[in-house]
Amino acid sequence: MIYRRICAALLPLMLSACASDPVPNEQLRLTEQALSQAKALGMAAEQSASLRLAEEKLVLAQAAMADEDYKQARVHAEQAELDARLAEAEHLTGKSQQQLAELSNAINRLRKQLGGLQ
Amino acid sequence: MKPIPLSLLGLAAAVLLAGCASSHNSSDQALQAAHTAFQQVKEDADVLRSAPKDLIRAGESLAKADRLSSYWGSADDVSHYAYLSQQYSAIAKQKSALNLNQERAVKLELERQRLQLALREAKLLSVQDQSNWLEEQMVSLATIQSERGLVMTLGDVLFDAGHSDLKASANRTVLKLVQFLQLNPRRVVRIEGYTDSRGDAQENLELSRARAQAVADVLVDLGIDAKRIEVQGHGESFPVTENASAKGRAQNRRVEIVFSDEQGNLGSSR
């Protein structure tokens, strides 16, 4: 009889764990926003592993939403958001690196010309 | 209803724990990786300065993962928060690199502008050098006549006899003249034509003027403002030598270019 009681006590506890997960609408919005922000920079998923991850996880999150598995949806969406933000940061850093290289080139050319004149 | 046998419960627990054990391993690894990543960025002053918020979130997520790792059956959550922490650390690192790059770009941009300015000045100097050189050349072509200033003589060989068209052999001299006038924009010139004493004096006067005008026309064609050029014909007057010999007459047939000083003051005409 005692097992039955334990089970009866455990069952709602376990179910409540699932049921208490709120619908992560806000997180999905944030994730989609982060992704479109990264894409607005002209990035393509082929060039960025992080962006590819973000897109894949957003698809997983949307599928989990459809299954009403809100916990998985939230987990995938949270990870996808950070993947997208990382992709954006990587892109910007790469761009600035490129800019530095161009500036160095320009400076070298100027130095050479100046050297030629002196 | 029959109570669930104890053995069955035990079996279920064993299965659950086994499942946990394998995911526990991977969550341990994720946690370790997140710790390593956070360790790297949290002591970096540049990261702290550039991305304090991301650094704080990396720390918070990591603390959450640490806390969950002591709970039974939360391996997936541990992995999740460890992953978030690791990503926050990576983002912070990127932002710091971006910030450093941008600061360096500002410095390089200043350096570039400084060099551009230096180059422009150096080029200007070399043009002035060239202009000085050219002036020396023009002076060597010309002679100083104290009362008239700097005078350059284009000899008889630059024109065909009786014609006022400038020959192609005059091009080099004329081009030098143009260059000199372009580099000395305030100088003006008076172009004076002369002939020998043979033939009709009136015709000679006209021919001398036409020859002087021909030189002026070429200068204008090459971009010198006509206002800077004065033209005069003197005919047989003011010979430089006797008209008795062919050699003397050839010397008297000439076009003279009188230069003003650098302020544009011309000596008075004859």
Image (cartoon, coloured by chain):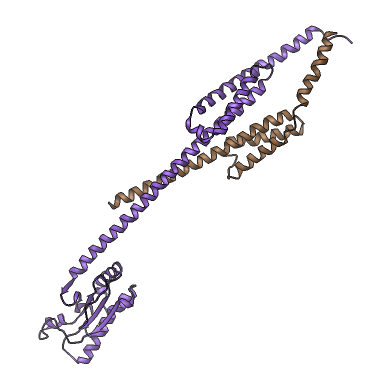
Chain colours: A brown, B purple
Quarter assignment of residue B183: bottom left
Taking the spot 77% from the left edge, 31% from the top edge, the residue there is: A68
**Which quadrant holds the N terminus of chain B?**
top right
Q: Nearer the viewer, residue B160 or A95?
A: A95
Q: Is residue B71 above or below residue B223?
A: above
Q: Is residue B150 above or below residue B207?
A: above
B187 to the left or right of B28 = left
Taking the spot 33% from the left edge, 51% from the top edge, the residue there is: A113
**Residue B26 showing in the rendered view:** no
**Residue B126 showing in the rendered view:** yes
Taking the spot 72% from the left edge, 13% from the top edge, the residue there is: B15
Q: Is residue B50 above or below residue B176?
A: above
The image position of residue B239, as x and y in percent, is: 14, 83
Numbered-mark total = 0
User: Outermost residue toward the right?
Assistant: B1
The image position of residue A38, as x and y in percent, is: 60, 41
Q: Nearer the viewer, residue B249 or B267?
A: B267
The image position of residue B121, as x and y in percent, is: 32, 55
The image position of residue B117, as x and y in percent, is: 36, 53
**Which quadrant holds the C terminus of chain B?**
bottom left
